[in-house]
Amino acid sequence: MSADIIFIQESIHTFKPTEKKAAEYILKHPDEVVNQSIQKVAEKAKVSEATIIRLSKSLKCKGFQELKLKIAYELAKSENTNSLYEDIPSDDSMKSFIQTISHNNIQSIQNTLLVLSEEELEKAVSLISNARMVAVYGLGASAIIAQDFKQKLTRINRWCEAAFDGDTQLTISANLSNQDVAFGISYSGQTKDVFESLKVAKENGASIITLTKSGDNPISSLADVKLNTTSLERNVRSGATSSRIAQLTVIDILFFGVTKSNPDRNIRALERTRKAVKASKKNV
């Protein structure tokens, strides 16, 4: 199986049986697929042409031709770089640590660009920009991402509440309305507390934004706007390292988008907060 075709590999567990069969064929024979017709791929994978079309759309492609272009791009990229995630180095050299961690972080961002939808980002920016209040939820490593977004929105004078435990998240969700946004962050998309809190927020009319790995999962099933990242870390010993970098990249994109939605107002707010922090440090 070619681990280079990240956007297929990470979503394969969500496909229906026939689509999964076609995806497995593509992953095993990507070089052949980019030069084959849809009829030939369907014949080789032992599925119908309609299945190939459905698979293409499941992978957010307009059709089979666009899917082939994405595969060709991935293959070309992998010829010039080792696109696999590396585990924690077995040797103790600092050089090895630097190279491995840097490679993983860079690869995580590059792979995320393949699954991140510009259309969904634009919707998220619009919802956040127009919300009365944004509630952002995350547990564990995702709590760090949630806290970062709260800090950013606070700097441009946007009302944001960040919650890192189930009880607090549910309490906030119970008071949300259709003027608000609830933003759930969970790489797995299966964090129970975040799911339950978003469910309550949705029942109260709040718009739901999720940031999870690509593919269907319980948390993203609640979303009005689905944002995705991918990291495919190879070993649990690595922890949520490269996935965190990918999530922070999406948060930065959202923040710049929201800031750009009202640049004069938001840049003035950024300048006020910068001056306040700078003045406080001088007085210590």
Image (cartoon, rainbow, N blue to C red):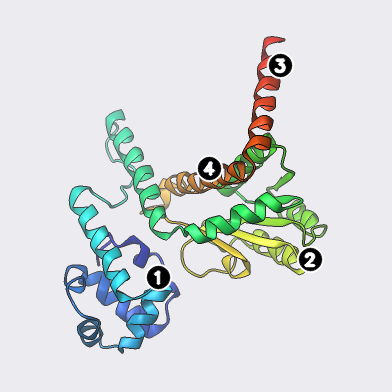
| Residue shown at 34% from the left, 61% from the top | 6
Q: Tell me the CA gap for discs 1 and 4.
A: 25 Å
Relative vertical location of residue 85 with respect to residue 15 in this rendering, above or below: above
Mark 1 vs 4, N-terminal side: 1
Left or right of 67? Residue 44 is left
Give SS at disc 2. loop
Q: Tell me residue 202's x, y (percent).
A: 72, 66
> How many other residues sit within 10 Å of disc 3, few (<14), some (14-19) or many (≥20)?
few
Looking at marks 2 and 1 on the same chain, the residue that comes earlier in the sequence is marked by 1
Classify 10 Å Cα crowding around label 2: few (below 14), some (14-19), many (20 and above): some
Query: In what quadrant of the picture does the C terminus appear?
Result: top right
Please give the residue where the numbered disc 3 appears in the rendered image: 280
Residue 28, image quadrant: bottom left
Q: Give the residue drawn at x 39%, y 49%.
A: 108
Tell me how far mark 3 sits from mark 4, CA to CA. Answer: 26 Å
Task: Determine contact: label 4, label 2, CB under 8 Å.
Answer: no
The residue under label 2 is 204
- The residue that mark 4 highlights is 252
Residue 21 visible in this rendered orientation of the protein: yes
The Cα–Cα distance between marks 2 and 1, rounded to whole angstroms, is 32 Å
The structure residue drawn at horizontal position 30% and vertical position 87%, both measured from the top left corner, is 49
- The answer to whether 98 appears left or right of 241 in the picture is left
Instruction: Report whether 60 appears left or right of 220.
Output: left
Cα separation, mark 2 vs mark 3, equals 40 Å
